[in-house]
Image (cartoon, coloured by chain):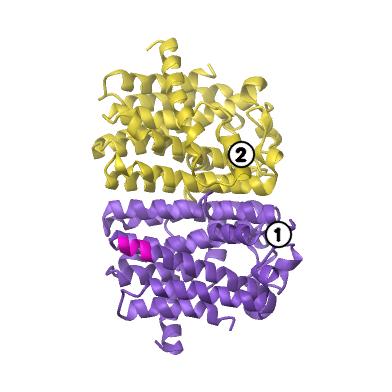
Chain colours: A purple, B yellow
């Protein structure tokens, strides 16, 4: 797969998610002010990496994208809610997100809290809606995976640890890695794994996909840390160096940029290794996608 | 059923929920600081009305309480998260909850936001866990009911409307009723309905239980408004008159105390009417429970 082909497929898949997201909150009896706040953040762009992963894995395992699209897109609800709440004054206090005013700057804190709560809750209503198209036992299992990954032993717990570590000296590599595995890794992992579960993959396949997701999640976070130091402000949509300024330990601050890059590549290699048994365009796409994560900073 | 018998069964059922809640967050990899904040609010007492309703309806429809207990208890996670977020300074700014400092007063705003997020997300992991004991198609359907009732077209949307109406003159009866049907009614309704769905009740039974839940939810809110005016501070755990002070329209402010009481009784009568086809101790319990809601203020 050439870089052009990868980008074309990434774009095509993200557009599919985008059209779903643009429609899916309508007809749900949501008060207008709340709907506006929810859609402001949900439709603010972004790579839609998590749904794209879920769709690609499901497709590689034999499930058509149209059947898994609502479930895959609902993971973007969860990702979006986490950004809205993380930006709040009491949390990271970020005024900008993707180059635009963050949700609470536009709608006020109360509506931003509720928009986040609404997105998180609606995600599970949407996930459950695929049970007409996909056997219910798979749907429940995938929902439990997502809830566990997004919950207090996963993403929410990771945000708590991130706050506890911020400004603290001597955060170790293991602590940093464990925190990120929860804060960003778990949701990326379950985006992949839920695709496999919904497709009815074997336990061996599920295990390979779980490791693939874990590994690209780890690589993704290291690259994010690198970009925060050497990236382009316009492209990032936020000031470079904000991690250091906020007193956060990062991979580059622990081991330098070069070693961080190497580590990210090792995770990517591990991810690609897990895909060895699979052939065809979907497997190729997932392999190239893994490498693409690191290529952003090389 | 005598008042003593009603109280005994209420207590027994609440204690069953209580023991489950006291254990269920352990072994889930939750960072200690976050777990403390979650359990502080989750284990702060309360009538556990929503799980009790879910258990009783399921039992009336033939499902043993032990099989539905995790699902029923998870609705209390959702109720608790909503209280934690509603108390935040950006929302209702309440320093007290059930006579104790509210969550953000104890743990700070950031942890209170995360504790709420964690409780909400964990609820769905726990709900899904009953799929080993109960057919998965019922479990998914019940989860979708809960997510829809708790989400932006239900509880979260109702809180948004409540904020929009607060301080506004001329809120009508229909607006007040619609807002409360979302803010408190939806979760009470789905506590009942999910019990019926999990038990595999017929669509006719589901419809009766849905109306029962809606009606007691409406009665419950009217009684809450009355208690805010004439209740006992020690028993309420918050100052009497706080609704009026905050500029909220209430049933008594629209129609006076006596007419509000009558209206609550009408809802209770409608709820009891729906239970006519059912016999046995569980149906008796649900009938007495409906009347008990209004008897608190008569």
Position of B109 relative to A45 (above/below)? above
Q: Which residues are magenta?
A: A204-208
Q: Which chain does tag 1 point to?
A: A
Rendered view: B73 above or below A134: above
Residue behind mark 1: A93
Which SS does the magenta portion mostly show? helix
- A205 part of magenta stretch: yes
Where A96 falls versus B205 (above or below)? below
Residue A272 occupies quadrant: bottom left
Q: Position of residue A187 (x, y in %)?
A: 49, 60
Which residue is identified by label 2? Answer: B36
Choose top left, top right, bottom left or bottom right for residue A276.
bottom left
Q: Is residue A9 left or right of residue A295?
A: left
Q: Position of residue A42 (x, y in %)?
A: 52, 65
Q: In what quadrant of the picture does the N terminus of chain A appear? A: bottom left
Which residue: 57% across, 58% down?
A178
Q: Residues within 10 Å of mark 2 (few under 14, many from 20)?
A: some
Horizontal side of B97 relative to A201 (left or right) equals right
Q: Is residue B155 left or right of residue A113?
A: left
Question: Residue A192 in the image: x percent, y percent?
Answer: 41, 65
Chain under callout 2: B
Nearer the observer: mark 2 or 1; the answer is: 2
- Residue under the image location 65 percent in, 26 percent down: B237
């Amino acid at each position: 797969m050439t870089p052009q082909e990868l980008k074309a497929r990434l774009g095509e898949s993200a557009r599919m998610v985008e059209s779903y997201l643009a429609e899916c909150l309508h007809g749900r009896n949501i008060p207008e002010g709340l709907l506006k706040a929810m859609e402001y953040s949900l439709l603010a762009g972004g790579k839609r990496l998590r749904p794209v992963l879920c769709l690609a894995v499901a497709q590689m395992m034999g499930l058509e994208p149209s059947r898994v699209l609502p479930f895959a897109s609902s993971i973007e609800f969860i990702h979006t809610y986490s950004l809205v709440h993380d930006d709040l004054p009491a949390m990271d206090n970020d005024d900008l997100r993707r180059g635009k005013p963050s949700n609470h700057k536009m709608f006020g804190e109360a509506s931003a809290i509720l928009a986040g709560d609404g997105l998180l809750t609606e995600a599970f209503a949407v996930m459950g809606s695929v049970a007409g198209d996909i056997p219910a036992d798979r749907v429940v299992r995938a929902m439990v995976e997502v809830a566990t990954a997004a919950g207090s032993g996963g993403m929410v717990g990771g945000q708590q640890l991130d706050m506890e570590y911020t400004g603290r000296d001597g955060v170790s590599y293991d602590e940093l890695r464990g925190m990120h595995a929860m804060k960003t890794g778990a949701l990326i992992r379950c985006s992949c794994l839920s695709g496999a579960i919904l497709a009815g993959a074997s336990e061996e396949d599920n295990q390979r996909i779980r490791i693939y997701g874990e590994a690209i999640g780890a690589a993704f976070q290291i690259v994010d840390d690198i970009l925060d130091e050497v990236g382009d402000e316009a492209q990032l949509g936020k000031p470079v160096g904000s991690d250091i300024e906020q007193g956060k330990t990062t991979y580059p601050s622990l081991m330098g940029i070069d070693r961080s890059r190497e580590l990210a590549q090792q995770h990517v290699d591990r991810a690609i290794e897990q895909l060895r048994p699979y052939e065809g365009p979907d497997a190729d796409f997932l392999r190239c996608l893994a490498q693409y994560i690191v290529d952003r900073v090389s």
